[in-house]
Amino acid sequence: MFQILYHPSVLREDFPHLNRNIKERLKAAIEHRLTRAPEDYGKPLRGELQSLWSLRVGDYRVVYRIDREEVKIIQIAHRRDAYEAGILEARRRGWL
């Protein structure tokens, strides 16, 4: 089983802007999918984001990195914002 680690910015900046229903869906998806098989449920990203993965939860994307038995959640964003800002955000948060 994988341990889930949230970057502090995810908890401070990403989660507070979401409504309760979306938060519950995201937390359930992370708990049920990423703790068990993050490579099976996620999609590997390409280009400059090739070390990262993305989990689709409705219109939202959970961007994460798999490191041994840890899944590091880097960003949670609406799909329109997740990838264009993803490179800068991952670098800013120090996980790329």
Image (cartoon, rainbow, N blue to C red):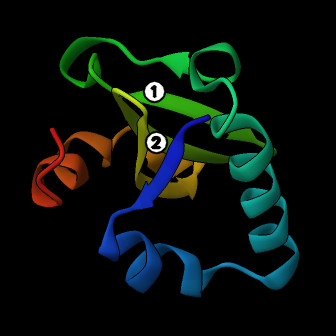
The quadrant in which residue 33 appears is top right
Res. 59 visible in picture = no
Q: Quick check: 39 left or right of 20?
A: left
Q: Position of residue 37 (x, y in %)?
A: 66, 23
At a point 33% along the width and 64% down the height, the residue shown is 7
Q: Please state which of residues 47 and 94 is positioned toward the viewer in this rendering.
A: 94
The label shown at residue 53 is 1
At a point 42% along the width and 57% down the height, the residue shown is 5
User: What's the distance in space between the residues labelled 2 and 1, CA to CA?
Assistant: 6 Å
Q: Judging from the image, what secondary structure is the residue with disc 1 in?
A: strand
The quadrant in which residue 55 appears is top right
Q: Position of residue 73 (x, y in %)?
A: 43, 51
Q: Position of residue 14 (x, y in %)?
A: 48, 73
Task: Please name the amino acid that badge 2 sits on.
Answer: Val
Instruction: Return the residue at label 2.
Output: 63
Q: Judging from the image, what secondary structure is the residue with disc 2 in?
A: strand
At a point 80% along the width and 43% down the height, the residue shown is 32
The label shown at residue 79 is none
